[in-house]
Image: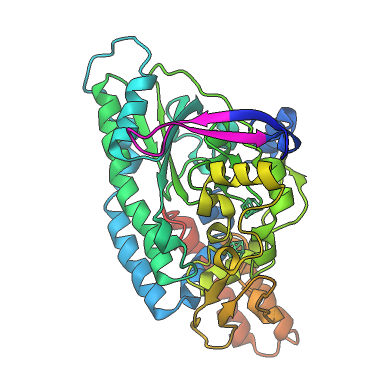
Amino acid sequence: MLKVGHVVVRPGRKVGMDPVEIPIPEELETVPGIPMVSKDIDFYSREYPLLRQQVEHAADTEWAPSVGTPAMQAYHHQHQAVMEEFYPSMNRTGDLKPTGTPSGQDVTQLIRDKAMEMGFLDVGFTDHDMRFVYQDRKGHVKYSNAICLALEQDFAETQTAPSMAAEHGHYGTYEVQAPMGLRMVDYILSLGYGAQLHGPSNHSAATIPMFVAAGMGQLGANGQLLTPHAGARCRLQIITTDAPVTFDKPIDYGFHAFCQVCQVCVNRCPGRALMREKIWWRGVEKNKLIYKRCRPVMSRYEGCAICMKVCPINKYGAKAVMEHYVETGQVLGKGTHDLEGYTLHDESTGKYATGYFGPGELPTFDADFFKIPTGTREAAALDELVEHIKNNNDGLDQGDDDKALFDFRERLRFIIHGEVSDSTMF
Ligand code: SF4
Ligand code: SF4
């Protein structure tokens, strides 16, 4: 039996449910939230502002659907059509005027109760930290208080990941969450205050730091927010507001240290995209996901999400996981087929690994598998031109060279005059 350092008490996962008490072993205690060096975060946000995925990784975002299975491609188009209905209203919420009269009273509890009544898994309040706002959204964000809203993704569907059912769970949650967020905006407007919706998909900032600051979880080795009730199996959304609210505080759930003991997602990732050790990245100590090893896998294998599915906190909840650790010093479910097993279904080329992989078994891929377009769309266009020149270095075919240059110019023109998508899929 390990010594308990402190006990975290969180509200139940639904209205009317008892609060849960989570014992945190002393040996897993680190800091509330995440270790960070504030002046380093200041420096990186100023000199190297964060870019939206649709900007920084635009080349592979455009490429990804082309390698999905026909079923994935069809579903993504269907989902995109649903979301296109919401994006314009979501993007305009910052212009809406309050419809009620402000009481001047703190409205934290009213908003918390409303969110839980609507079916959100959890809600928290914090300062909307502008250091995490994306470069091209800095002028977009209107208010300085952040309401962090987490909506649970279906458990049973997620347990089948990677699969089309898990993709339906993932994107289906967005489709429910977008109108829920709009209804929350209406509610806050009715209280007499401004409210601006960010996400799902069309986020204005990196959301996880705000959720951590609001005490709603800690960052996991899988690069996702680990919430106490559902691990990373949550979809996140922020409403910025000028309503008077009381900020929550970050919490030490023990996850920061637990991940170093657990390592299940690191061991099970088919792309070897997750790092065993923590590093300091942009002023934060974390296990940094290697994007270029994840993207080729998730694009081909139905969104992958194995790192979400195999996480014991997703599967059993933090209370059960921490109680088991206190009693045994072991990670609940680690090494079992039930937690760690997964099946890779056929991918679109029919060329890469399929079948069931139990604990200790991983698929392998050739080097070509990981060669994907990288960087911004401009960078990808330039890469193509450079490749053409490398392959035709004698310059004998002037017509071919001229065509390559012409195509490059037209592509740049299209990029410069085009819009950045609200979706991270296309
Ligand atoms: S989505 Fe799949 S490939 Fe990407 S990090 Fe998670 S387990 Fe690895
Ligand atoms: S699987 Fe284990 S190591 Fe990975 S995020 Fe979950 S708790 Fe952390």
Residue drawn at (55%, 41%) of the image = 319
Range drawn in magenta: 8-24
Residue 117 appears in the picture as rendered:
yes
Q: Does the magenta stretch include residue 20?
A: yes
Residue drawn at (53%, 77%) of the image = 344
Q: Where is residue 157 in the image (x, y as percent from the top left)?
A: 40, 63
Q: In this view, does 401 lie to the left or right of 308?
A: right
Residue drawn at (44%, 79%) of the image = 69
Q: Quadrant for the N terminus, please.
A: top right
Q: Position of residue 60 (x, y in %)?
A: 56, 66
Q: Position of residue 358 (x, y in %)?
A: 62, 74
Q: Position of residue 277 (x, y in %)?
A: 78, 52
321 and 377: which is toward the camera? 321
Residue 238 appears in the picture as rendered:
no
Q: Is residue 45 magenta?
A: no
Ligand 1, seen in the image, is in the quarter at bottom right
Relative height, residue 396 to residue 285 (above, below):
below
